[in-house]
Image (cartoon, rainbow, N blue to C red):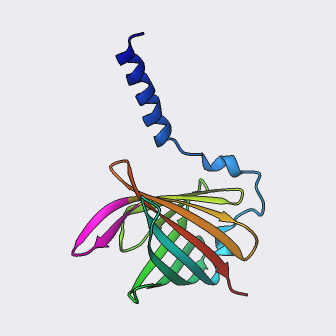
Amino acid sequence: MSWHNYLSSVLGLCILSACSTTDVSHYAQEKPTLDMKQYFNGTIDAWGMFQDRKGEVVKRFTVVILCSWQGDVGTLDEDFTYSDGSKQKRVWTLKKQANGQYIGTAADVVGVAIGTTSGNALRWKYVLALPVGNKIYNVNFEDWMFLMDDKVMLNRAEISKFGFKLGEVTLSFTKRP
């Protein structure tokens, strides 16, 4: 094999492995089992931060989430307060599908979010219309949430555009008694 072909093969494998992600079914046996209607019910407090692709913390925030369900339709009413004093509201509507997945919509979500649960994990994939300065950028979010116990959930989201990582969001949720 020539040096050029070898290098092309190695680069191709690196690109493919960078695009691969763990399947949510990998967590099927993990406990406690995440029941979306049970955990996202009542009031949840969250603390988070956004880090750019270099790992620098750009913004910190808190969120108060009021959660309720009517049958298989849930509402997550989120109020964000950022470290710079700015505020934001996002209201999610979640719908449980026959196949066990969840479809989520919100005013700043382009199309629908697709959520899949397995064991203690939830994987959300969606496109968010993200305001930056005077512009809005459609960026890809891949959220991974892990239920730690009946009160605490941890969340890590990777943000990308055109396959390039822009940054990460880290969140800790605590369900109020």
Q: In which quarter of the image is the C terminus?
A: bottom right
Q: Answer with left or right where residue 115 lies relative to residue 2.
A: right
- Asked whether 50 or 99 is in front, the reply is 50
Determine the image quadrant of residue 15: top left
For residue 117, above or below residue 22:
below
For residue 61, above or below residue 161:
below
- Residue 159 image offset from top left, x and y in percent: 42, 59
Q: Which residue is drawn at 62% across and 82% down?
A: 44
- Asked whether 135 or 75 is in front, the reply is 135
- Residue 73 image offset from top left, x and y in percent: 55, 73
- Residue 21 image offset from top left, x and y in percent: 54, 45
Q: Is residue 54 magenta?
A: no
Determine the image quadrant of residue 115: bottom right
Q: Residue furthest left?
A: 134
Q: Residue at x 52, y 70 (%)?
A: 94
Q: Which residue is drawn at 46% across and 34% down?
A: 14
Q: In which quarter of the image is the N terminus?
A: top left
Q: Which residue is drawn at 42% across and 23% down?
A: 9
For residue 12, above or below residue 25:
above
Q: Which residue lies furthest to the top in this view?
A: 1
Q: How many labels does the image show?
A: 0
- Residue 82 image offset from top left, x and y in percent: 44, 83
The dominant secondary structure in magenta is: strand
Q: State the extent of the magenta-drawn residues as a range.
A: 127-139
Q: Does the magenta stretch include residue 135?
A: yes
